[in-house]
Amino acid sequence: MTWEAGADLVVVGSGVAGLTAALDAAAAGLATVVVTKDGIAEGSTRWAQGGVAVVLGDIAGDSLDAHVADTLAAGGGLNDAAAVEAIVRCGPDAVRRLRERGARFDARDSRPDRTREGGHSAFRVVHAGGDATGAEIERALVAAARGSELRGLTVLDGHVASDVLRDAGGRVAGLAVLDDHGRPGVLRAPAVLLATGGYGALYASTTNPPTATGDGVALALRAGATASDLEFVQFHPTVLHTGAGAAGRRPLVTEAVRGEGAILRDRTGTAFMAGIHPRADLAPRDVVAAAITRRMAETGSGCVFLDATSLAGFARRFPTVHASCAAIGIDPATDPIPVTPAAHYACGGVVTDTDGRTGVPGLYAAGEVARTGLHGANRLASNSLLEGLVVGERAARAVLGDRVIRGVGEPLAPAPALPVADRAVVQRAMSTFAGIGRDATGLATASDAVEAATTIAVPTARAGVEDAALTLLAQAVVAAAGTRRESRGCHVRTDFPDRDDTHQRASLPIRLDASGRPVVAGDALVGAA
Ligand code: SIN
């Protein structure tokens, strides 16, 4: 028996983008429901360490123009310059409003303290709790959401979104969900905002929580939206190496540790980033992650080492990293920290404008799930919380301004059966053949492995919905990575090591074909710089 309820806006996901949008929409009088798979505080946001990149105007030599320039330099020629301008310039006000909502950032001399990360030309990253910025932002937004529950914001936790429902005219008509026991429900609503985070769970080793199964991209593609830049999976250069074969969410070692002076060394103690990039250890993270991967192969080592022994007060400044190190018997004050790259951030996603609009009337996306064009081929560190805040706010305003909430159509039944592959097979194939360093043969092998493990099934519970999303994302990432025959940003092809600006400086749009398979659509290239 399917239950039904109604809302003006359904927000899927409860990270920084989702909660910011939901709070603003509820404050503006929209009956808003936030749907989350686990508890309201369990998304990717809480694991973010470094901070929010923002120019507050009080750091000599820094400027909004410099932040824009750093974002474009990191993005490898695929940013949408107008989106970069719009989001970076809205950052200071969005951070001010977040502070008014209760988020407390670390201060020095009565001003927000700033750190630096890879690719930034200035100290401009505000942080909280030392290296617990995401946790503080999530705390503040969750507290605000709980406070506004009586004013039109309802949280439906323990539910996975299984389909965006549309009416006969193609407009959004609601969201189908399943609870933890597989019981179905329908939220009738004229507007759905996807804020589900990324797809780190495509890989065996990731900084993402297990909820990051690409649900939002899969929901949007199946609803007729376009995705893009999916091949640009950013690997964080430094997660704590806890032994060969460690899987699932890995402890992050924030880039701010390098921003404040730590140096990468190989197993012989050689500092290897100098000479690879003018910014050495603070090069954009695609450069650092690829260099670490090469060095590990050259030295036959399962990790490299981050030497933070010169940093004073490590435990106070980086309490989260310190605790993760202590748990495996490492003291960063005296020991080099063993680190490896791991899947971290989806630079691409559902194609939206900077107000979160997709091409499907009534469907919006914000945060990591979306591709606004801010990141291009490689995200600049700490631009993601910024994007979530800014586009979360703008999407709430768009829902109000677009007047989609005037009426809701009769939802059509979605396709019940979907391709679903075994998650372990997908993760093994993607980790082996579609990580840092891909080639045509490996990508074909990954595609074959996923295909062979795929059956057509009707997902009846959360695991099935997630596995269907991961299967779709694996097919889409492999299709995009195979089509892009060059190396650019965090897409590294060993068989095409050079960047090809003559023919390939454009994003690849992905849509579903008539059989439901993701394909690179040849008719348009979206938002190249
Ligand atoms: C980090 O703290 O290194 C991660 C921050 C980010 O991914 O933006």
Image: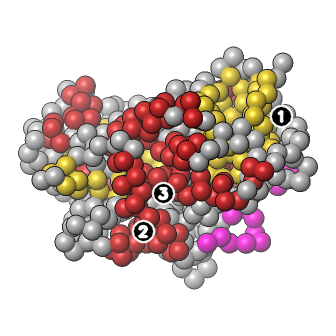
The colour scheme of the drawn protein is secondary structure
- Asked if the residue at tag 1 contacts the one at tag 3, i.e. Cβ–Cβ closer than 8 Å, the answer is no
Task: Decide if residue 17 is on the left or right side of residue 450.
Answer: left
Q: Which residues are magenta?
A: 509-527
Q: Quadrant of residue 411?
A: top right
Main secondary structure of the magenta stretch: loop
Residue 203 in picture, x, y percent from top left = 52, 40
Q: Which residue is mark 2?
A: 89
- Seen at 85% across and 53% down, the residue is 170
Q: Which residue is mark 3?
A: 390
User: Which element type, helix, strand or loop, lies under badge 3?
Assistant: helix
First along the sequence among labels 3 and 1: 3
- Seen at 36% across and 47% down, the residue is 100
User: Which of labels 2 and 1 is toward the front?
Assistant: 2
Q: Which residue is mark 1?
A: 417
Taking 142 as reference, is 296 above or below it?
A: below
Measure the C-alpha gap from mark 2 to mark 1.
Answer: 44 Å
